[in-house]
Image: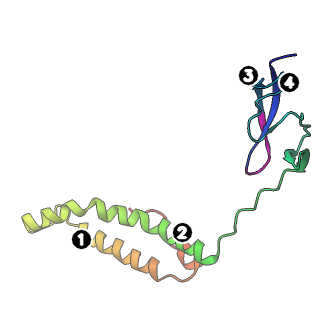
Amino acid sequence: MTNQITVYCCNPNTSEYVGETIARQSPLDKEGVYLIPADATEKKPSFEEGKITKFINGVWVLENIPEPEPKPIPTTEEKKAAKKIELKAPRLAYLQSTDWQAAAFIKYGRPLDIGLPAKCQLANDEINAIEACTTLTALNAFSTTFE
């Protein structure tokens, strides 16, 4: 008699087949007694395309692979929130990129770029207008870039 056998393992939570391993003969017991891991069996599973093999109540069972859940369709509110983020991002990035010039304005009493205050005001005005929008149609009127 051989001192090892092949056993078939399943997931302890889902009972799904996960692979095979070797069970060795017990050194303390009589011949024919093997140390089989938990969640394993000597019964060989069967397989079929498009099916999951599970070990349930001592028997291998074939189950259909479940269909994946469809992606949830975003609500109008979620679409509006995402669009507002998309539209505000380049304007906020512009304002952040000009923050260092505020220090120059304080130090020298004038902006380094004469058009900068007007452009910053435009960015702020557009951000406020975007926030005030209540429909996707109104949001789509804005450019996704700010230059």
Q: Earlier in the sequence, mark 3 or mark 4?
A: 3
**Residue 18 is covered by the magenta coloring:** yes
Is residue 6 or residue 83 the one in the foreground?
Answer: 6
> Does dot 3 land on a helix, a strand or a loop?
loop
User: Alpha carbon of mark 1 to alpha carbon of mark 3: how far?
Assistant: 85 Å
Q: Earlier in the sequence, mark 1 or mark 2?
A: 2
Is residue 33 or residue 107 the one in the foreground?
Answer: 33
Q: Earlier in the sequence, mark 4 or mark 2?
A: 4
Q: Are marks 2 and 3 in contact (CB under 8 Å)?
A: no
Q: From the image, tell me which residue sits under label 3.
A: 27
User: Alpha carbon of mark 4 to alpha carbon of mark 1: how far?
Assistant: 88 Å
Q: Amino acid at mark 1?
A: Pro
At x 91%, y 47%, the residue is 61
In the rendering, at what x and y percent does residue 139 appear?
A: 53, 75
Q: Are marks 4 and 2 in contact (CB under 8 Å)?
A: no
> Does dot 1 land on a helix, a strand or a loop?
helix
User: Alpha carbon of mark 3 to alpha carbon of mark 4: how far?
Assistant: 10 Å
Side (left or right) of 87 relative to 112: right
Query: Which contiguous range is marked in magenta?
Result: 13-19
In the rendering, at what x and y percent does residue 118 appear?
A: 27, 72
Q: In the rendering, which numbered label is found on residue 82?
A: 2
Is residue 3 or residue 63 the one in the foreground?
Answer: 3
Judged by depth in the image, the label closer to the viewer, 4 or 1, is: 4
Q: From the image, tell me which residue sits under label 4.
A: 32
At x 76%, y 61%, the residue is 69
Q: Amino acid at mark 3?
A: Pro
Q: Amino acid at mark 4?
A: Gly
In the rendering, at what x and y percent does residue 101 appear?
A: 19, 62
Can residue 146 be seen from the camera position used here?
A: no
At x 63%, y 77%, the residue is 76
Quadrant including the N terminus: top right
